[in-house]
Image: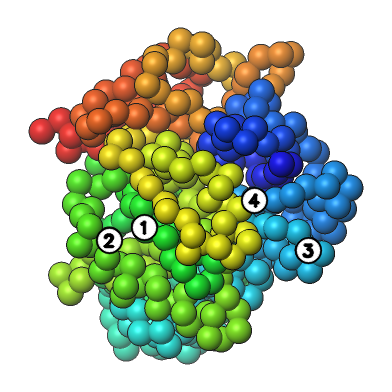
Amino acid sequence: MRILVLGGGGREHAIVWKLAQSPREPQIFVAPGNPGTRHMALSVDMVINDVESVLQFVLGHDIDLTIVGPEAPLQAGVADLLRAHGRAVLGANRAAARIEWSKAFAKQAMADAGVPTAAFRVFDGASEARAYVREHGAPVVVKADGLAAGKGVVVASTVDEALRAVDDMMIARVFGDAGESVVIEDCLQGPEVSVFCFTDGRTVTPLVAACDVKRVLDGDAGPNTGGMGGYSPPPFWTPTLEREVRERCVEPVVRHLANAGTPYQGVLYCGLMLTAAGPHVIEFNARFGDPETQLILPRLENDLVDVVEAVATGHVEALSLRWSDAVTVGVVMASGGYPAGYHTGMPVAGLDAVPSGVIAFHAGTAERDDAIVTGGGRVLAMVGVAPTHAEARRLAYEGAAAVSFDGAHYRRDIAAFADY
């Protein structure tokens, strides 16, 4: 079997790592991949948002199955084009993936499906949005409607903050066309959790949960990032909660999209707030999360090739998905200055000294003169796998301590509850 993975970050390294364990021994291609995938897959130099280039590669190399990592190729319609040419793909079609790339569409889909979510309004003009903020008051959440690399959400604790967010998005266009419209919604309170499932548009697999840590500094201080680490499963995740989230939050929106003629086929990522009134959906994403993928795939007991094939061919009902009782804790090692300005090209030392029980997933690395150097903001995710949170946490930090590069920093309080 020949499989193509689109993407080059830590999420895609984790996907390739899991595929490479398959007893079916697939031949794996990854575009573009990274130094962590080079011994497991053939790297392809290709612009993955150029859907015609992806199609030509798939046809020319007789690829049996394509796995889409990031969201941009889905918005560009890569899954639609591949399916139109009879090729299997793990990834939602463009219309269904709109549940990620349009916040307004997602909120309306939730409302139509009866999914619990924060009350909201959508605005196409800055003056109307500003008037609503003044009338409604704070706190509120202001979201750019389109894709903004995970940065288009402002939790405004004051009216002035909310007004500034509206101006930044709609007038200054700091997120480009993503801010042409904004969603303003009530601010929910409670623990956050990310849940994931596979679906072929009809059947939804059991959910798996992870908590990721977004703020760059200990104690949840500093600016938001793409994710500084996390853990799976959360201590509060129970079979009862899993069933409630699946029945109230996930299955209704899958049914709604199918009834609307845009069945969702792929990985569905549901970001939740566990409020006093029960789980409420913050957002849906149309793909694996990052760094959550690095936390959940080590817990998958199934052959990932079998899982992806079942989803892509519409046979999830025959799939018995199993998540292990193992615990994962991940610590992201970032470049100095991240998420603002940072330097790259710093030599990375110690990867050959990572202890047993730790997986070093490459996210922002590069190769120079046959050596590994930093190539991005989030450089590595050190993931400990163990029977308990405390042991997984100890392993993850031992892994982080074994690796070094100039300016490296990471949070020291990931899964800190495990110390008590």
- For residue 106, above or below residue 412: below
Mark 2 highlights which residue? 242
What element does badge 1 sit on? loop
Q: Are marks 1 and 3 in contact (CB under 8 Å)?
A: no
Quarter holding residue 83: bottom right
Q: Are marks 2 and 1 in contact (CB under 8 Å)?
A: yes
- For residue 25, above or below residue 274: above
Q: Quadrant of the C terminus?
A: top left
Q: Which amino acid is tagged 4?
A: Ile
Mark 3 highlights which residue? 86
Specify whether 14 is left or right of 344: left
Mark 1 highlights which residue? 207
User: Who is closer to the viewer here, 17 or 46?
Assistant: 17
User: Who is closer to the viewer here, 332 or 288?
Assistant: 288
What separation in Å lies between label 2 and label 3 (alpha carbons)?
Answer: 35 Å
- Which callout, 1 or 3, points at the residue further toward the start of the chain? 3
What element does badge 2 sit on? helix
Q: Which amino acid is tagged 2?
A: Glu
Q: Circle 4: is it few (<14), some (14-19), or many (20+) Cα within 10 Å? A: many
What separation in Å lies between label 2 and label 1 (alpha carbons)?
Answer: 6 Å
